[in-house]
Image (tube, grey):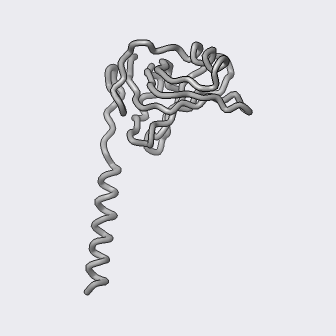
Amino acid sequence: MKKLLLLVALAFGISWNGQAQQKEITPAEIGVQYGKKVDKSNAITVDKLEKSLEKSPKFTGKVTGKVIQVCTKKGCFLTLQRTGDKEPITVRFTDYSYFVPADLVGKNVIVDGYAKVKDTTNEITFVADGVLVVK
């Protein structure tokens, strides 16, 4: 009897967890927010972020840029376009507490959080508390 109750509880827990992870993600339209609320003020461009990171190894604030890729599995990261043939900026989300839709590709966004450069590759990574669709 104990094994049967344990099996039922385990099956219920697995099904509940699966439902919790299948939250619907709002389609990307101007003004839609993901994660923490973000406003447009004081956002800098990707080019200005690069210049800032040449002077300091870390940046905290808002950056605006064009999304060129979104994780196809569940929207767990996005990438922002850089000029020339530079590697795009990889944007991950704080504690993976939210996800973004695939239709965000081609849209302009503002991400709010912090960035740093990997010294060996000059690759910029960004951890965002929130994302705002602006165009």
Q: Residue furthest bottom?
A: 1
Determine the residue positioned at 48% across, 21% down.
61
Determine the residue positioned at 31% across, 83% down.
3
Quarter-wise, where is residue 96 in the image?
Answer: top left
Q: Is residue 93 left or right of residue 26?
A: right
Q: Can you give x and y, in whole percent of width and height, for residue 66 in the image? A: 50, 20
Q: Can you give x and y, in whole percent of width and height, for residue 86 in the image? A: 67, 23
Q: Nearer the viewer, residue 68 or 109?
A: 109
Q: How many marks?
A: 0
Quarter-wise, where is residue 125 in the image?
Answer: top right
Q: Is residue 13 above or below residue 85?
A: below
Q: Is residue 79 left or right of residue 24?
A: right
Quadrant the C terminus occupies = top left
Q: Is residue 40 above or below residue 36?
A: above
Determine the residue positioned at 46% across, 20% down.
62
Q: Residue furthest front?
A: 56
Q: Can you give x and y, in whole percent of width and height, for residue 35 in the image? A: 36, 33
Q: Can you give x and y, in whole percent of width and height, for residue 33 in the image? A: 34, 27
Q: Is residue 70 above or below residue 3?
A: above
Q: Is residue 13 above or below residue 103?
A: below
Q: Nearer the viewer, residue 56 or 123?
A: 56
Q: Is residue 88 left or right of residue 24?
A: right
Q: Nearer the viewer, residue 72 or 130?
A: 130
Quadrant the N terminus occupies = bottom left
Determine the residue positioned at 30% across, 41% down.
24
